[in-house]
Image (tube, rainbow, N blue to C red):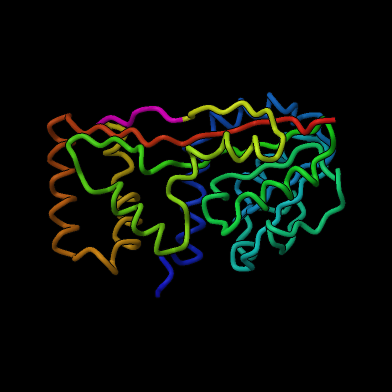
Amino acid sequence: MEPALTPDEWAEHFRRQAEWTRAARNYLYRRADLLRARRVLDVGCGTGVITEEMAARTRGRVVGLDINPEFLRRREGPHADYLLGDALRLPFADAAFDVVLCHFVLMWLRDPHQALAEMVRVARPGGWVLLCAEPDYGARLDYPDLPHAAWHIEALRREGADPFMGRKLRALCAAQGLDAEVGCISAPWTADAIRDSLDGEWATLNRITREFVSEDERRAVRAGEEAAIARGERFVFMPVFYAAGRVPG
């Protein structure tokens, strides 16, 4: 099966995701006192959008780890250390970091329990584990009713991802002994905001659905969405959840 996105398309997607969740990350950085952290790990860092952001906000060392060498070759900057590695077998000693985080990562992993166990293992006692963003496409709301959520769910399942990861964060954290704060970082998208991002969103939709949605159907759905935007009716709520917990000890 053809990959849903090319490496360059993924790089742009990572930048858009980072914009969507910026306010929540700022809150989580303050919660974990990132400024004073001496050692920070970004698990599944992709092209390093958030890794570089953290490197600019702490006096300590920031490491980005990803299993995809193409992402690392397209890294966003030189201010952090980057390492090829597997989130299920982190190549670090126990208690090696003050803050360990991931962002839209657990949903892609075949064993998110193992990945979180590894994140907890390499965080020091009293350190922070931040699951900055995991979506739940099964709880997405669209008005008028359009097939975007169903299309995303099908595309993600074909890629081996879990489109319902957001609702599972509290249970995942509890299984690892983390008394985590869990919250929703989403806000409703109304017609004006959707209009501004429509071309980028449809570029992604066209790419990820090309194997199971016809071009004619995609065109018809986009026309319906554009008409709803023109009437001022279009509304989307796409829940994305975070979890933040301190490692016991």
Q: Position of residue 48 (x, y in %)?
A: 63, 52
How many numbered marks are there?
Answer: 0
Q: In which quarter of the image is residue 24?
A: top right
Query: In the image, 34: left or right of 159?
Result: right
Report the quarter where the C terminus lies. top right
| In this picture, residue 130 sits left or right of residue 19 | right
Identify the image quadrant of the N terminus: bottom left
Magenta residues, start to end = 186-191
| Front-most of residues 204 and 179 | 179
Q: Position of residue 182 (x, y in %)?
A: 57, 28
Q: Residue at x 28, y 66 (%)?
A: 210
Q: Residue at x 21, y 34 (%)?
A: 143
Question: Per the image, is 190 magenta?
Answer: yes
Q: For this rendering, which residue is in front, 50 or 91?
A: 91
Height in image: 192 above or below 83? Answer: above
Q: Position of residue 98 (x, y in %)?
A: 81, 37
Nearest the camera: 35 or 172? Answer: 172
Residue 66 is inside the magenta segment: no
Q: In this view, does 176 lie to the left or right of 190?
A: right
* 70 displayed left or right of 207: right
Viewer-proximal residue among 182 and 5:
182
Residue projecting furthest to the front? 175
